[in-house]
Amino acid sequence: MTATQAEVLVIGGGLAGIVSALELLRAGKRVTLIDRDTPERFGGLALWAFGGMALVGTPLQARAKIKDSPEIALADWLRFGELAPDEHWPLQWAKYYVEHSRAQVHDWLLAHGLTFMPAVQLVERGRHGDGNSVPRYHIVWGTSRHLTRTLIAALLAADQGRLARLHRHRVTALDTQNGRITGAIAVNEDTGAEVPLQADAVVLAMGGINGSHEEARRNWPKDRPLPAAMLNGAHPFADGRMHHWAARHVGARITHAGEMWNYAAGIPHPFPHFPGHGLSLIPAKSALWLDHSGRRIGPEPLVTGFDTHWLCQQVAAQPKPWTWQLMNWRIAAKEFAISGAEHNQRIRDRQFPWFLKETLLGNHRLLRQMQRQSPHFLVADTLRELANRMNQLTASLDIDPAVLQATADRFDAHFSHGRPEDDEQVRRILQARAWGPDKLRTSRPAPLQKPGSGPFIALHTQLITRKSLGGLQTDLHSRALDARGAPIAGLYCVGEAAGFGGGGASGKRSLEGTFLPGCILTAQAAARSIIQGA
């Protein structure tokens, strides 16, 4: 089979592209899959992601006596995402997601031999209880890397001589005949040669639009603070170029381009895969989040796990494009984590005894690793010494040791007065610890300077870009729509390229863990539509 004989051309080798191709191959279709990266990095950002999924009505929830339903989940989704009543296709996709995540994601993955960790997490609760009202964050055992490699293995098993993969190729244009998409032009990025590709249908699965910081800044909402510098936690190939080509040349519609799911605490990757590459930290709930001068950000303290969207705005509004997280070793051993497969070795490699040991006794291994590898992970025996190291890192005198000491003293005074709950952060910590799985990963509130809890740790963090919440608008068949809302014949769009459905199914905020399932659901919808000849 030559590439030009494909019935379907899938553009993008991330999770959405893999699932699209897999379902099409199983239905007997001939597929050409185009991927800009190397064969070793086939899988895109999903290969490096953590693997958390927001799923509704699962056996794990039932076992933990969590009462969830599509109706409860949809109410949470719409309230937290602030979706407007006239957002027709995002609303339709939100409804579709909560109604089908159990059967078409959870059960579908189980059928591929994948499993989930036994504890369901409660994330994105909302600052005022307006987020997830029940735990529904499920973690793939083996992380997203195991998920991706499992589905790649299924893809290769379904090949039967009907799959052509072109790695290190970039699609630069789509072909049209009589108003219908009939293929594409790709460029071999190693040789520069053009490769014409013909197909009856084209599936756009090229990822989001803010892997390019220029594109992210261009789309940044004017009413939200924009930091002077950011790290990149997205895939650099997700640069929005195909979005704009499709909009200019075939009338596709980009919506919600300014809505992004960024994270408030990133550090530069010690071994970057591309310029500006950052690691997204899961900030310790018990850490004091400080501005560049060592003063606690407020008046409402920043605490992770409640409203990521709000956290990012608070960090972006700071006078300098970095913040500090101050904690001690006791807190960090229990709470410090890095998102993604790379730094979650015990989950990634499915080493349950070791995972259990580090959960109960503290992940000292990861702390020592980051102390060795990252200059942004500072450790000192005294706050004065820590302040000096913070100033050395930023080549400034921003941190007055007396100010840092006073910040810690003010927090600790709540405990000496016997009223720690007077502090809003302590109240949020106690709220998190009320859910059993969170209690395992959240320290009991205690003075920062409690004897035996040291040494002290300061993390130098920046806002880090991650996922696009907007994209090309699609219907429930994942057909790309034009400005009139009509399907563009032969053109489909899936995953992050489609804003995880409808051009922005999450609105302004995600319930977290909606991205991998959004890739799977939109890809399955596109494959069904193509197979049925819609």
Image (cartoon, helix red, strand yellow):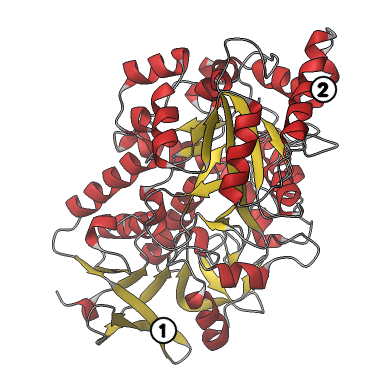
State the image quarter where residue 123 is shown: top right
Residue that mark 1 sits on = 174
Image location (x, y in percent) of residue 253 = 61, 75
Is 316 drawn above or below residue 302 in the view shown?
below
Q: Which amino acid is tagged 1? A: Leu
Q: Residues within 10 Å of mark 1 (few under 14, many from 20)?
A: many
Q: SS of the residue at dot 2?
A: loop
Identify which residue is drawn at 65% across, 36% down: 387
Image location (x, y in percent) of residue 164 = 20, 68
Residue 356 appears in the rendering: yes
Q: Which mark is residue 423?
A: 2
Work out how far the residue at label 2 is from the one at label 1, CA to CA, in angstroms.
57 Å
Is 451 drawn above or below residue 146 in the view shown?
above
Image location (x, y in percent) of residue 356 = 40, 16
Q: SS of the residue at dot 1?
A: strand
- Nearer the N terminus, badge 2 or badge 1? 1
Image location (x, y in percent) of residue 18 = 33, 56
Is 234 drawn above or below residue 237 in the view shown?
above
